[in-house]
Image (cartoon, rainbow, N blue to C red):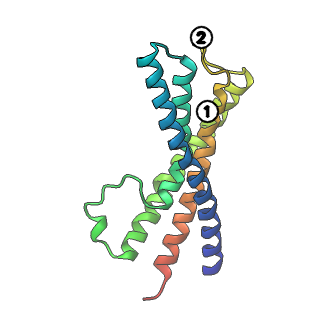
């Protein structure tokens, strides 16, 4: 059982590691895009609704697709007034219970509700309501169920690693 949990956890981790590293390049793209937008605005007194929308679309991809990577590397927000002083097994119990009681249900509910939301946007070919805006808004909406699926998978990996820590012998 230990080997199966370890293999499954490693497989999920490798998926989110690759996606996270790929998504990290979007931060460079976003910074360059914002710099060009600001330069165009202040030097040439021009702006584009499409560029502004592209900025928030890229930010959305970074946030949604990078959340699982952040969880994998334990870089998410945590209030660890007590947690930092816990033993590894106590931390594993906190992680396991938090994952089972909060993270997995939240991811599941978000995935289920966002699928209909994304499907409706795709069905009507939703685009920007602004003149000059981006034509395929459903693409960024599709990042919601994808991102939360990746986060759910990483939560499963965290649960597996927590179980392995709990059952390990000292």
Image position of 89 with respect to 19: above or below: below
Residue hosting label 2 = 131
In the visual, does 157 lie left or right of 92? right
The extreme top residue here reads 131
Q: Label 1, on which residue?
A: 140
Q: Secondary structure at mark 1?
A: helix
Image quadrant where one finds the C terminus: bottom left
Q: CA distance from mark 1 to mark 2?
A: 18 Å
Q: Position of residue 57 (x, y in %)?
A: 56, 32
Q: Residue furthest bottom?
A: 170
Number of numbered markers: 2
Residue visible at 51% across and 47% down in the picture: 106
Say above or below: 10 vs 25: below
Q: Quadrant of the N terminus?
A: bottom right
In primary-sequence order, the first of circles 1 and 2 is: 2
Q: Secondary structure at mark 2?
A: loop
Determine whether 76 is above or below 32 in the image.
below
- Give the crowd class for mark 2: few <14, some 14-19, many >=20 residues within 10 Å: few
- 41 or 65, which is in the foreground? 41
Q: Is residue 102 above or below residue 61?
A: below
Residue closest to the eye, 61 or 5: 61
At 61% across and 69% down in the image, what residue appears?
10
Q: Position of residue 14 (x, y in %)?
A: 62, 64
The label number, if any, that marks residue 72 in the structure image: none
- Residue 26 placement (x, y as % from top left): 55, 43
Residue at 47% of width from left, 77% of height from top? 165
Displayed quadrant of residue 39: top left
């Amino acid at each position: 059982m230990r080997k199966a949990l370890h293999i499954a956890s490693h497989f999920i981790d490798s998926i989110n590691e690759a996606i996270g590293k790929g998504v990290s390049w979007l931060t460079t793209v976003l910074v360059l895009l914002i710099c060009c937008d600001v330069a165009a605005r202040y030097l040439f007194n021009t702006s584009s609704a499409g560029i502004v929308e592209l900025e928030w679309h890229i930010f959305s991809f970074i946030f949604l697709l990078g959340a699982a990577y952040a969880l994998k590397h334990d870089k998410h927000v945590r209030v660890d007034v007590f947690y930092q002083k816990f033993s590894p097994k106590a931390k594993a119990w906190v992680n396991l219970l938090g994952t089972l009681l909060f993270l997995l249900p939240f991811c599941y509910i978000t995935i289920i509700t966002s699928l209909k939301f994304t499907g409706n946007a795709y069905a009507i070919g939703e685009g920007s309501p602004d003149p000059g805006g981006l034509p395929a808004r459903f693409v960024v909406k599709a990042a919601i169920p994808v991102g939360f699926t990746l986060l759910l998978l990483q939560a499963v990996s965290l649960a597996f690693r927590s179980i392995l820590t709990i059952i390990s012998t000292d």
